[in-house]
Image: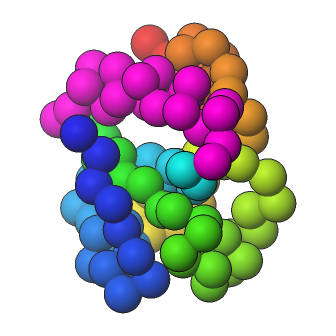
Amino acid sequence: MALHVTTETFEQEVIRSDRPVLVDFWAEWCGPCHAVAPVLDRIAAEHESELKLVKVNIDTEHELPQRYGVASIPTMILFRDGEPSASVVGAQPKGAIERSLGLAV
């Protein structure tokens, strides 16, 4: 469901997106990253018309985590109008993630 982005595609897919983008900074070896992935997929599906989900693999993309101050994973950053507007660090329940990102209804 989520689109994998690289340093080369980040500008087009995230910064220039016409809707908010939830960026999941993760790594293949990260257990909590795998645990939170289905939660993020559910959030993206429930907000499909107004939110896009993308993933950045920190093992292959070193510049992006550094640029956005990602110190631990999973880190999820919500971008609105090309700028980071909210973030969540760590695998958390769906409701907590949605509240932290301002997506709770």
Horizontally, is 21 left or right of 70 in the view?
Answer: left
Q: Colour mode?
A: rainbow
| Residue 75 locus on image (x, y percent) | 66, 47
- Does residue 25 sit above or below 32 in this rendering? below
Quadrant position of residue 64: bottom right
Whole-percent x and y of residue 13? 29, 69
Residue 94 in the image: x percent, y percent? 54, 15
Q: Is residue 8 above or below residue 58?
A: below
Prevailing secondary structure class for the magenta stretch in the rendered image: helix
Residue at position x 23%, y 61% in the image: 18
- Residue appearing at x 54%, y 33% in the figure: 34
101 is within the stretch colored magenta = no
Left or right for 43, reference 24: left
| Residue name at image x 55 percent, y 27 percent | 36
Whether residue 36 is in magenta: the answer is: yes
Q: Answer yes or no: is residue 87 visible.
A: no
Relative to 47, say whether 25 is above or below.
Answer: below
Give the side of residue 14 with respect to residue 101, left or right.
Answer: left
Q: Residue 16, image x and y in percent? A: 30, 74
Quadrant hosting residue 61:
bottom right
Q: Residue reaching furthest front?
A: 29
Q: Quadrant of residue 105?
A: top left
Give the number of callouts.
Answer: 0
- Of 25 and 18, nearer the camera is 25
Stretch in magenta = 29-49
- 42 lies above or below 75: above
Along the viewing direction, whichever of 59 and 48 lies nearer the viewer: 59
16 or 45: nearer the viewer: 45
Q: Which residue is at a point 58% across and 61% down the rendered structure image?
A: 84
